[in-house]
Image (cartoon, rainbow, N blue to C red):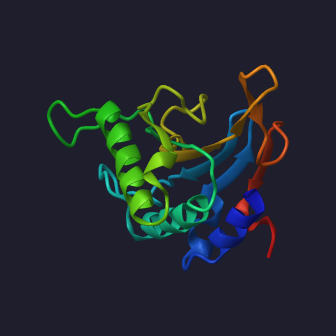
């Protein structure tokens, strides 16, 4: 699945512009797809909940591929530590959750099945990617987790079935292969 996603992502129109902001990692949870923001906003404009053109195209491509898989999906929104000041009583909590939900809606319109979505979570700045620099733009991100399939064991209890690769962490930038 990781290889197929990497191939599809390389076909995105502005791939050269966004390639350094997409990371696929196989973890103990499953395949983690991270769309990392830059200082100028790679996938979302500052303070906006809906993805911009590059974000839309990438999420639509990912949704088309994931819609073919039986796996459950979690979608997470994350922010940096800069307080959101666009509206009264609207914080990084709301922004991260709203971006995750906007991403879910878009992906469901473009291939992701409604029964695939297991969770939509907003973490605000509570799980920084770069803990040493809480204001790092890479802390602002959307994470899509393709969960491992669960297979009933002989005793009737569900066990994790690694349906992607191994459960060890394997990270790759999408641009490694031509």
In front here: 173 or 144?
Answer: 144
In front here: 62 or 50?
Answer: 62
Position of residue 82 measured from the top left corner of the image (x, y, whole percent) = 38, 35
- Above or below residue 114? Residue 178 is below
- Above or below residue 51? Residue 32 is above
Position of residue 7 measured from the top left corner of the image (x, y, whole percent) = 71, 71
- Above or below residue 139? Residue 64 is below
Q: On the image, which quarter does residue 151 sit in?
A: top right
Q: Quadrant of the C terminus?
A: bottom right
Residue 157 vs residue 116: left or right? Answer: right
Q: Quadrant of the N terminus?
A: bottom right
Q: How many numbered marks are there?
A: 0
Residue 32 visible in image: yes
Residue shown at the point (41%, 32%) measured from the top left: 124
Residue 83 visible in image: no
Position of residue 176 measured from the top left corner of the image (x, y, whole percent) = 80, 65
Residue shown at the point (42%, 58%) measured from the top left: 108
Residue 107 vs residue 74: left or right? Answer: left
Q: On the image, which quarter does residue 28 sit in?
A: top right
């Amino acid at each position: 699945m990781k290889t197929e996603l990497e191939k599809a992502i390389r076909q995105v129109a502005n791939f050269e512009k966004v390639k350094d902001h997409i990371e696929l990692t196989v973890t103990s949870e499953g395949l983690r797809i991270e769309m990392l923001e830059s200082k100028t906003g790679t996938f979302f404009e500052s303070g906006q909940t809906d993805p911009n053109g590059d974000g839309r195209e990438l999420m639509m491509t990912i949704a088309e591929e994931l819609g073919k898989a039986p796996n459950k999906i979690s979608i997470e929104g994350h922010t940096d530590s800069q307080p959101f000041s666009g509206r009264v009583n609207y914080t990084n909590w709301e922004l991260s959750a709203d971006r995750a939900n906007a991403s879910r809606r878009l992906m469901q319109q473009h291939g992701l099945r409604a029964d695939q979505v297991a969770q939509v979570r907003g973490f605000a700045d509570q799980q920084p990617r770069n803990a040493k620099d809480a204001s790092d733009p890479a802390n602002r991100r959307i994470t899509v987790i393709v969960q491992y399939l669960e297979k009933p064991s002989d005793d009737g209890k569900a066990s994790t079935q690694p349906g992607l690769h191994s459960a060890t962490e394997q990270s790759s930038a999408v641009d490694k292969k031509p």
